[in-house]
Image (cartoon, rainbow, N blue to C red):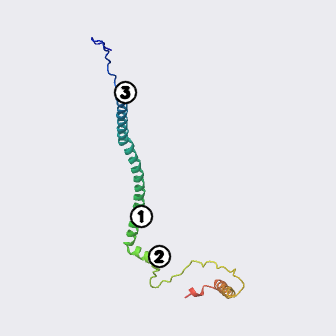
Amino acid sequence: MKVPSHGTIETVPKPSISHLATQVVSRWTIRLVIAGVMVAGAASLFVFPLRDYVTQRSALAQKNSEFNLLADTNEQLQNEVNDLSTPEGIRNAARAQLGYVRPGEQRFNLVPMPALPTDLPQTWPYTLVTDIVRVRTVQNTAANNSSLSPLAP
């Protein structure tokens, strides 16, 4: 405090507390903004590229497996094309897929018939079916016991 010459006391003005509070808030705001910019920079430099790398790696593995599957399919198709480019390959394909038989040949199916269920109820109309099955069973056993006369010349 200063004492003036004419006897009055003069006081020095005190700094405003609100001014100090504003400085503290502005410092923290600046620090938070800088920290936010640093976090955003770190995310853009490390986090996002790493996430993209992992995603692209799994997508690449999936595409590689699809490519390998398609390459195997192409190889099988190319083998089939190579087989069908010869007369023998065409003949074999016609035999297998269309049942082609050359003149003078006979075709025999050597696949046995599946067993038929015979445990049907004993009421009409199932008795008719049971009788038909019984007759066919007797015919098949008789045909199996006979000689190979249909094949003889």
The disc labelled 1 sits on which kind of residue?
A: Thr
Tell me the element at label 3: helix
Residue 78, horizontal then vertical, whole percent: 38, 66
Say which label, 3 or 2, has the lower sequence index: 3
Q: Which residue is mark 3?
A: 17
With 59 as the anchor, is 141 left or right in this view? Answer: right
Say which label, 3 or 1, has the lower sequence index: 3
Residue 73 is marked as 1
Say which label, 1 or 2, has the lower sequence index: 1
The disc labelled 2 sits on which kind of residue?
A: Ala
User: Observer-nearest residue: 89 or 105?
Assistant: 89
The answer to whether marks 3 and 2 mark residues whose Cβ atoms lie closer than 8 Å is: no
**Mark in front: 1 vs 2:** 1
Q: Is residue 144 above or below residue 40?
A: below
Seen as rendered, the residue at the extreme right is: 122
Residue 108, horizontal then vertical, whole percent: 53, 81
Is the residue marked by circle 1 packed among few (<14), some (14-19), or many (20+) residues within 10 Å? few
Q: Quadrant of the C terminus?
A: bottom right
Q: Quadrant of the N terminus?
A: top left
User: Observer-nearest residue: 135 or 144?
Assistant: 135
Q: Which residue is mark 2?
A: 96
Residue 24, horizontal then vertical, whole percent: 37, 30
The disc labelled 3 sits on which kind of residue?
A: Ile
Seen as rendered, the residue at the extreme left is: 5
With 23 as the anchor, is 148 left or right in this view? Answer: right
Marks 3 and 2 sit apart, C-alpha to C-alpha, by 100 Å
**Mark in front: 3 vs 1:** 3
